[in-house]
Image: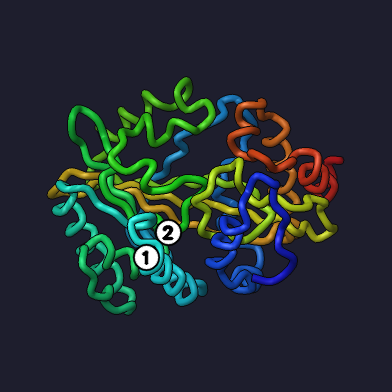
Amino acid sequence: MTGRRPSVDSTVVSTTLDELFAYAPDAEVYRRSGAPEWLDELDLRPAPPYVRMGTHSLDLDRWLIADDARTMELALRGRLIDERGPEVFDARPGSEEASEEVLELVVDWSRARGLGDPPTAAHPLEAAARHVQEDLCLMVHRDGDWHLDAGALCFPTFWSLQEKLGRPTAVVHGPVAHYADELAPRVDRFFDRLRAETPVWRRNLSIKPYPLLFLPTSRALQPVGDLDVADDGSPMWIRSERQTLRRLPRSGAILFTIRIQLAPASVLLVRPDRARDLAVMYRSWDQAMLGYKIGGNDLVPSFVPWLERISGAA
């Protein structure tokens, strides 16, 4: 990672900040890519509603993504699994069959693209996780609800595997602003009705003043730094989660994949249409949504005026 390290609120101990940056990716890999095509996949409609399912039918040829960041990201994922242990990988009893199914799917996907086989590992889900750029979470139906019973979560966005492992969907998504009143019943019904032959994908996004992938800290403890936005949009980065959901035919579990994709805010200089949409969306949010998505970042008075300026909306 290049550039100045952000400062951090005084409540954050230095070891926490040091740990985050110890696992920083090579940001230049993302700078070289130019304006990513996935900018057009972002749902930037203004609120309300504040949260949407926003799912689309998934072509299984595009189930996972292997790109120019693969070598670097797989090395970082391997380090995290080796060094952080159950903080980033764990599985509850009863998730074994589903984990084997996941590994089989990853093997088939990899071989079809000439990417070889996953490495040997003590657990099938760990082997799969060391071979793809996506995080892998297994939702298992038991006790009348869907539970997060296994996961490889190397690149979380302000949550950790251990705080959610074994918990039902309502608890897993509990911190999401407006989830309970706008989305919870729909998510439960969606999980119940999802079929193996109809996988789906969706995207979300957030803006961060750093290109970190490993973010298990809370929003209150995030490094925020100086948010004066330069003409090129620095130090801001667009962080998008490309998520897929597919029902596993044998076990009936649901595999939830999460791929973090990063781009410097400067890519919006060549996409003023997307900059305008993003500014309008942020201006439409209430305090609950701003608090959830932004936390300690003073994003609206620092970043939104830049978006409006480069898009001609100011």
Question: Which residue lies under the disc numbered 1?
Answer: 81
Q: Which callout, 2 or 1, points at the residue further toward the start of the chain?
A: 1
- Amino acid type of the residue tagged 2 in the rendering: Cys
Residue 97, x across and y down, in percent: 14, 53
**124 relative to 221 in the view: left or right:** left
Res. 111 in view: no
Q: Give percent across and percent down for residue 141.
A: 21, 36
The quarter of the rendered structure image containing the N terminus is: bottom right
Question: Does residue 263 lie above or below 241 as drawn?
Answer: below
Closest to the camera, between mark 2 and mark 1, is 1
Pick whichever, 15 or 180, lies toward us.
15
The answer to whether any part of residue 99 appears in the image is yes
Identify the residue position indicated by label 2 in the image: 154
The three-letter amino acid code for the residue at tag 1 is Ile
Residue 204: x and y, percent?
Answer: 53, 45
Q: Residue 236 vs residue 314: left or right?
A: left
The quadrant of the image that shows the C terminus is top right
Q: Are marks 2 and 1 in contact (CB under 8 Å)?
A: yes
How far is disc 2 from disc 1 in space, using C-alphas?
Answer: 7 Å
Q: Secondary structure at mark 2?
A: loop
- Tell me: 304 left or right of 187: right
**Which element is circle 1 on?**
helix
Name the residue at 77% across, 46% down.
303
